[in-house]
Image: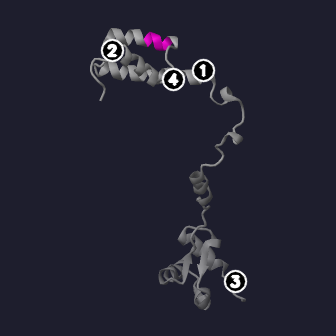
Amino acid sequence: MGLKLTLQRRLAADLLKCGIHRVKLDPEKLEEVSEAITREDIRRLIKDGIIWKEQKKGVSRARVRARRRKKRSRGPGSKEGGKHSRVSRKEQWMMRVRAQRKRLKELRDRDLITRATYRRVYMMVKAGAFKSVAAMMEYLAQNNLIRRPLL
């Protein structure tokens, strides 16, 4: 092909708001395109569908989704660092104590435990008396500190 349509491509790119490499021309109607020298001519060709903008090529997320589905790289073989280097002892303690205190507050606000019980158990939580929220609830149940049965 001897036709150089750089002007037409440039004008079309401007009108279509894209780069010149995304501008596509109908190979059957190249003569018509070469005669278009004004923006108005190019606009008409775009309207007629002789010039159009090619869709952008995106990056596929399929591999990421597949990886998420497989939930790979989670087994003991891929874990680096010791037990306490992944989540430090202090962070584990903080998570445990915060969960217990949150549950205590819920019980107190729903009037399932008295304020005195709340205070006493709160201090026990601080002292590290309970391994988990479940252990704390078990203690409350065994010592009949919960006013009415939980739902």
Among numbered discs 3 and 4, the one appearing first in the sequence: 3
Q: Position of residue 67 (x, y in %)?
A: 61, 53
- Calculate the distance from the C-alpha at mark 3 to the C-alpha at mark 4: 72 Å
Q: Which residue is mark 2?
A: 144
Q: Which residue is mark 3?
A: 4
Q: Position of residue 9 (x, y in %)?
A: 62, 77
Among numbered discs 3 and 2, the one appearing first in the sequence: 3
Dots 3, 2 in contact, CB < 8 A: no
Quadrant in the picture for residue 13 = bottom right
Q: Position of residue 57 (x, y in %)?
A: 61, 67
Disc number placed over residue 96 in the picture, else none: 4
In terms of secondary structure, where does tag 1 sit?
A: helix
Magenta stretch: give its range: 122-126
10 Å crowding of disc 4: few (<14), some (14-19), many (20+)? some
In terms of secondary structure, where does tag 2 sit?
A: loop
Q: Nearer the viewer, mark 1 or mark 2?
A: 2
